[in-house]
Image: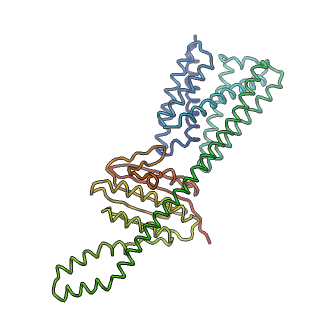
Amino acid sequence: MMTWYQILFFFLTNGLRMFFGMYLAITLLDLSANMKKAVAFSKCCACAACASVCITVLSVFPIQQIYIGGAETIILTVILYCIFAANLRMSLFLMFFYEITVGLWEFIISAGLGVAFHSDSFLNTKSFGYMAAVWIVRLLMLGMAFQIKRTSKRNKKQSSQVIAGAALVGFLGVVLLSGQKTIAISDDQLTVWVIFAVLILIAILFFNLNRQYEMEKAIAQLEKDKNTLMERDYQNLKNSYAASAKLFHDFHNHVEALYRYLSKNSTEEAMEYLENLRTPMQSISETTWTGEEAIDYLISSKIALAISQNIRVNTNIEFPRHTNIRSVDLVAIIGNLLDNSIEAAGNAEDSLRFINLTIRRINDMLVIKVENGCSAQPAVADGVLQTSKADKALHGWGLKSVRTAAEHYDGTMETEYRNHTFRTVVTLSFGICQ
């Protein structure tokens, strides 16, 4: 029968192991991108506590450790899938090898302490020595979590390097233990852990290759969507300028018609005629200038499209000149955000048919904020804003593409829905090109 302090020990260590496992999966799979960090952290803590209770209860019964590890893998996978909407197959893959890695390090630390103190008792899972080894592993995991958090803000690739480094050190630790003669460790046990250590390294390599493939596929899709967006906007601009050319070509005819109305004192007819001319004239004259030709064309065409759908548009643009941000990336970001805004505001009632576009420079950061009214909270699946339009190829290619473009400039993207207003804020770091 387990004592109270052993139960408390298992609860605390299981909780830390569960928390770090979920934190690792959330970081590697980018599962917290569409929720506030505080919300993701609180969910992670609550789920870790509940899972720890379940595993601690199982630990009270005489169940082999391999079955407890399997139950823990399943619990963590279900939590990631149900609570954080993670990919089921990838979650199971990560949690399976995570459990193996934690077991490997607990074996290495406990065996290492046994060698250092010339005692086999550290390998006894019920001894105080083994408990001390487990706590050392937990402290190392907390340190690793801090390092991953610090490096993931700058480069997610560095987080993978930290994990790969820990796995490589674990493999070397097992190899070194196989050559020691201080304490008795069976050859079968050492062989199993060596095999597991090799499998962990192979799993990390596979995960990195798979993530690289997914990134390349996402970038390829992003470029395709950019081209589609720019082609469509080019056609819109072409049609707009064709209409403008026709309007100015017929200008002398309009002047002649107005002259005849006024010469006959037909004021009401003249006013009606002028009113019919106001809409196309306003769509031509309301142009937003940033100094970037492609962006000017894009914003102007989107504003004209919004106004044609009776959507009110307010702009506040302060754009820095000669930055290292490529026009094609800005077109992709701004174009996609405005498309989503026009789609949402166009389906809302009159009081919510508005769009606010703000582009401001704050020190070395470019902030792009788009707000729009919407009748209900938009549906978001896997980071992609779901469109209600039938033409899925030209619409709704998603906030994930915006985030991908922003990450090229160490940027971020945050979304918020409150009081029938959907807000998206994108920040980009930039440098001035001489």
Q: Residue furthest bottom?
A: 263
Please tell me whether residue 202 is drawn above or below residue 235 in the rendered image: above
Percent x, y for residue 412?
Answer: 52, 53
State which quadrant residue 270 falls in.
bottom left
Q: Which quarter of the image is occupied by the N terminus?
A: top right
Left or right: 414 as drawn, with respect to 112: left
Asked if 70 appears above or below 255 in the picture, the reply is above
Q: Tell me the quarter of the image containing the C terminus.
A: bottom right
Image coloring type: rainbow
- Horizontally, is 174 left or right of 271 in the view? right
| Badge count | 0
The one nearer the camera, 244 or 116, is 244
The residue drawn where x is 36% and y is 60% is: 355
- Image location (x, y in percent) of residue 236: 42, 67
Front position in the image: 1 or 248: 248
Q: Is residue 223 left or right of residue 172?
A: left
Look at the picture and state if 170 lies above or below 395.
Answer: above
- Tell me: residue 298, above or below residue 164: below
Image quarter of residue 288: bottom left
Q: Residue 373 placed where, x, y %?
A: 34, 55
Residue 202's x, y, as percent? 70, 35
Identify the residue at image location x=58%, y=36%: 90
Depth order, front residue of 147/21: 21
- Residue 289 lies left or right of residue 192; in this view the side is left
